[in-house]
Image (tube, grey):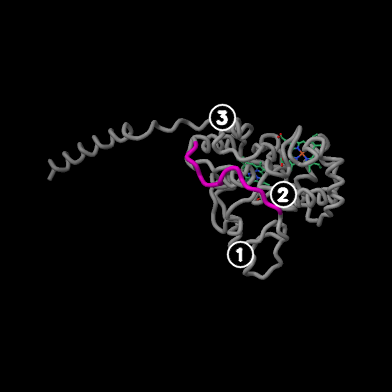
Amino acid sequence: MHLSLAVLSVALAAVLSLAPHTSDAPPRTPDAKRGLALLQHFNDSLPRNRGNALRCTSCHLEDGRRGSAMSWIGVTTRFPKYRARRGSVETLEQRVNECVARSLSGRMLADDGASMRDIVAYMESLGRAPLPARPDTVRLAGDTLRGALAYASSCARCHGSNGGGALAPAVYGARSYSIGAGMARQHVLATFLRWNMPQDRPGSLDAQKAADIAAFVLRQPRTDHPGKERDWPNGDAPSDVAYATAGARTTGRPLPAVRPLLRRQVAPVPATSR
Ligand code: HEC
Ligand code: HEC
């Protein structure tokens, strides 16, 4: 009995000591500096995952520190959490990949890959508190015609007269964020504009003008997000979502007008990128 136990434990020790040699190299320590570089230069650094002309910090301004621009300060403490869009609990890695697939119209990263771990390490390095104050949400309806005029006078010089980007990245068209992005919602875009744009004069647009410009920008074509009809599976899609969901159909609420959609460069499915 004693002998067989001893033999077993020797055999077990041998197996355990062999185990590390048979698997991949041990994961290196997550690198917050590389994480920030990926957030700033996503397309150059991760060409297999790139979709459009944006980078993460095109929207998450000041490297994710600006309170009015979806700050990442403390975000590692806010996840995992329940999200109505998915209808279940979401991890931070899944949330990052939602922005990869929807906001960058790109291909998701491996949840446990080195790039994802570096990105999360950067977010962790921002500290946990205090969370910058979130600005008031702009919920006004917008007027598309007034928005077109205001876009031409306040935005076109940086984002291009056709929305395709110039000094600043695209805000509509094939190189912009997909229809499944948070920024493709009227209230989310209007609020972002009200507090952050024009970049050289943030705060100068009043709420109505921000709403008008958002309404104009969101009537223009942008890339599709396959599977978007499965969002908000419990039928609780916010009123400013730009597409019909299966959940909303069952509640009998009015469906949004159909928007012009463009083909994506890459499918959003996960890849084994590092
Ligand atoms: C087109 C603009 C845009 C781009 C580009 C973008 N995001 Fe986002 N992101 C948003 C918006 C808008 C939200 C909040 C959406 C909402 O209202 O739920 C958000 C939310 C997040 C959150 C959750 C924040 C929280 O506190 O809940 C994380 C994490 C995040 N983004 C990471 C990224 C990463 C990483 C990238 C690049 C791969 C990226 N985002 C690119 C617009 C963008
Ligand atoms: C002085 C130049 C400038 C003006 C004018 C300007 N922006 Fe921007 N905008 C930027 C820059 C630069 C960024 C990206 C910040 C970065 O990458 O660091 C940006 C980011 C954005 C984003 C998020 C990224 C994207 O491309 O979708 C949106 C949306 C946006 N601007 C819309 C507008 C709208 C609408 C107006 C007019 C009210 C406007 N901007 C005026 C320079 C400008």
| Picture layout, residue 34 above or below residue 247 | above
Of labels 1 and 2, the one closer to you: 2
Quarter of the N terminus within the rendering: top left
Q: Which residue is mark 1?
A: 247
Total marks drawn?
Answer: 3
Residue at 75%, 51% (x, y): give it: 218
| Circle number at residue 221 | 2
Disc 2 + disc 3, Cβ < 8 Å: no
Is 4 situated left or right of 75 in this image? left
Of labels 3 and 1, the one closer to you: 1
Residue 224 position within the rendered picture, expressed as x and y whole percent measured from the top left: 64, 50
Distance, label 1 to label 2, CA atoms, is: 24 Å
Quarter of the displayed picture in which ligand 2 can be seen: top right
Q: Residues within 10 Å of mark 2 (few under 14, many from 20)?
A: some
What range is drawn magenta here? Answer: 260-273
Q: Label 3 amino acid?
A: Arg
Mark 1 or 2 closer to N-term? 2
Q: Secondary structure at mark 3?
A: helix
From the viewer's side, name the closer residue of 180 and 81.
180
Distance, label 3 to label 1, CA atoms, is: 40 Å
